[in-house]
Image (cartoon, rainbow, N blue to C red):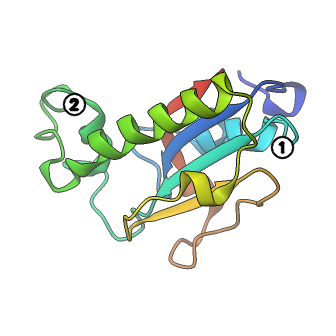
Amino acid sequence: EVNVKKMAIDVPSMNWGFSRASCGVTHTKAAMAAYQISNPEKGRVFYEVQTHNKNTLTGGPHCSFTNSGCAGLCSGGKEFSWIHDKVADSVGLFVKAVAASHQITKEYFEIDQPDVTLFVNEDQVTLSSQSSDVSERAVPATVSA
């Protein structure tokens, strides 16, 4: 069992995730947890894709992190194909910022995507206004320096 209360990420970190669980991933084993245990003084970024009103079981955006779907359950999340480009762009920004020892700021990591909420450094992850339970949050992509 993963116990995030006993863990810490003491290097810059960037995380992508969903506001609603998918594929049985819980918030205690996902990017929201990684963001919460990351040191804000080292720099941390969390992109939360809003999926509170999406089908996350058979075609939700989690499938966009695969090449051809999830074990035959979904088609690869074509509606969310933009995620590939946005994650790639954000990884590029993150690597440049860390390599140059630039301060990690919200302005630097903002993206033009309406279904994404950005949390940086001291920002606290709060319940989505559309989600009723923090346990619905889940994330498949985490990058740390």
Identify the element where label 1 is drawn.
loop
Is 1 left, or right, of 49 in this rendering? Answer: right
For disc 1, the marked residue is: 40
Q: Which residue is mark 2?
A: 70
User: Which residue sits at x=70%, y=66%?
Assistant: 126
Residue type at the position of mark 1: Pro
Mark 2 nearby-residue class (10 Å; few <14, some 14–19, many ≥20): some
Which image quarter: residue 62?
top left
Residue 98 x %, y %? 67, 28
- Image mark for residue 109: none
Look at the image and tell me in which quarter the C terminus lies. Answer: top right
In this rendering, the label closer to the viewer, 2 or 1: 1
- Circle nearer the N terminus (2, 1): 1
Residue 47 in sight: yes
Element carrying mark 2:
loop
Question: Is residue 17 rendered to the left or right of residue 31?
Answer: left
How many numbered marks have been drawn onto this rendered protein structure? 2
User: Depth check: 97 or 26 in front?
Assistant: 97
Establish if 43 lies above or below 18: above
